[in-house]
Structures are given as C-alpha cells and as structure tokens.
Image (cartoon, rainbow, N blue to C red):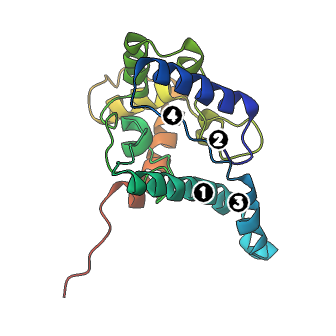
Amino acid sequence: PIEQKSDQLKRAKNHAKWLMSKYKNVEFIEKDLTKTYLDFKSLFEPRYQIPLALANSKSRLRMVVLYQIAGSSSGLVVGTGNKVEDFGVGFFTKYGDGGVDISPIADLTKSEVRELAKKLGIAPEIISARPTDGLWTDDRSDEDQIGASYGELEWAMDFLLGSRSAANITDRQKKVIEIYNKFNSSNKHKMVPIPVFRK
C-alpha cells in the first residue's frame, strides 16, 4: 500500500487469507510504502511534482519491491493486466505494473477474467469491485480516468477488429470508439517493443 484506501487494502488482505487457506506455498507480505513514497516525493521541487508522474512513481515503487521479493526467492513477477487494459488502451504504468515476467491473463478480456474468477471461487467483493489502479488518494476508478467502462472498451476493440456490425451504432458507441482510439494511439509506446536503432 501507498496512501491506500482502506477498502482496497481490506480486499487484498481477505484475498490473501483465502489463498493461504487453499495453498501451502502462499505467503502474505505487506510492505507499506507510504513513507518511502513521501520521502521520494520530497526530493523534488514543485515543478517536478506533476500529479500523473507521481501516481506512476507509486506503481514503479511497488514494482521495485515485487522484484526485490521475487529476486530473493527465485520467483517471477506475475502481471494482472488483461487484453483490453494492456493491449487495447494501454492503461498501465510503463516499468510499473506493466513491468512483469509473465502475463497469464493478458489475452483475456475483463469480462472473461470475471467469469474465470467466478469459476475459481474468488470472493464476489473482488469480482464486483470497480476497477482501479489505486494510485490516487481520491476514489477514482479506471472508468473515471478513461471515460468508458471495460465492457464498452471490449465492444470497441471487437468492433475495430471487425467482429461487430457497423449497423445502428449509437452516439455513445461512437464516443467510446473515439476514446479507445485516443488511448490506443497515445499509449502505443507501451504496447510495442522498445525501438532499436540499427547501425
């Protein structure tokens, strides 16, 4: 946690307890990074304290800790990004939550992830929680930041891939396509390999 909302932390702890009750090899480690983050933030004068850059720094600090734990236990860092989030609109932090070793659900839509979660017996409070990156001190969700729900973005992705009919598109669907294209374009640098300059 870094300046985390109590309900988000509670859901994480409840899920960890459930996992530990089912699997012997699960360990719960909590490292509150709030002080580390505030110390990091204090290194910079106000002109370098842009809110989005600071929010992304939270994600990157978390990733440093995850890699420290993984590197100290011969482990891998597992990604939680789904198909629309990571490869549709690129809604993740480069070298933060996007920096992982494996991405087991990256080819699943958010809807498919929810269905899988139900089949696995994941707590309904997690399945029904509003998706959030947890990087802001207010209660903004991914939808608040993007301007469309994951269900709408899934529709747009299917439409743009030619899987949906162009007949009878509503004004809202046109707006969602616009949102999808804007995020996909501006976040392309996160979704393609790092450019290599050839000699």
Q: Is residue 25 left or right of residue 174?
A: left
The disc, 1 or 4, on the residue closer to the chain's N-terminal end is: 1
Residue at 31% of width from left, 24% of height from top?
164
The circle on residue 176 is 4
Marks 3, 4: nearer the viewer: 3
Mark 3 residue element: helix
* Identity, as a three-letter code, of the amino acid under mark 2: Gly
Marks 1, 3: nearer the viewer: 3
Q: Residues within 10 Å of mark 4 (few under 14, many from 20)?
A: many
Q: Is residue 63 left or right of residue 38?
A: left
Distance (Cα) linking label 1 and label 4: 25 Å
The disc, 1 or 2, on the residue closer to the chain's N-terminal end is: 1
Distance (Cα) linking label 3 and label 4: 35 Å
86 vs 187: above or below: above
Q: Which residue is mark 2?
A: 134
Q: Which residue is mark 1?
A: 56
* Identity, as a three-letter code, of the amino acid under mark 3: Tyr
Mark 2 residue element: loop
State the residue lying farthest toward the front.
24
Q: Residues within 10 Å of mark 3 (few under 14, many from 20)?
A: some
Q: Is residue 7 left or right of residue 105?
A: right
The disc, 2 or 3, on the residue closer to the chain's N-terminal end is: 3
151 vs 194: above or below: above
184 vs 44: above or below: above
Q: What x and y, as percent, mark residue 106?
A: 34, 38
Distance (Cα) linking label 1 and label 2: 11 Å
Distance (Cα) linking label 2 and label 4: 23 Å
Residue at 42% of width from left, 39% of height from top?
81
Mark 1 residue element: helix
Q: Residues within 10 Å of mark 1 (few under 14, many from 20)?
A: some
Marks 1, 4: nearer the viewer: 1
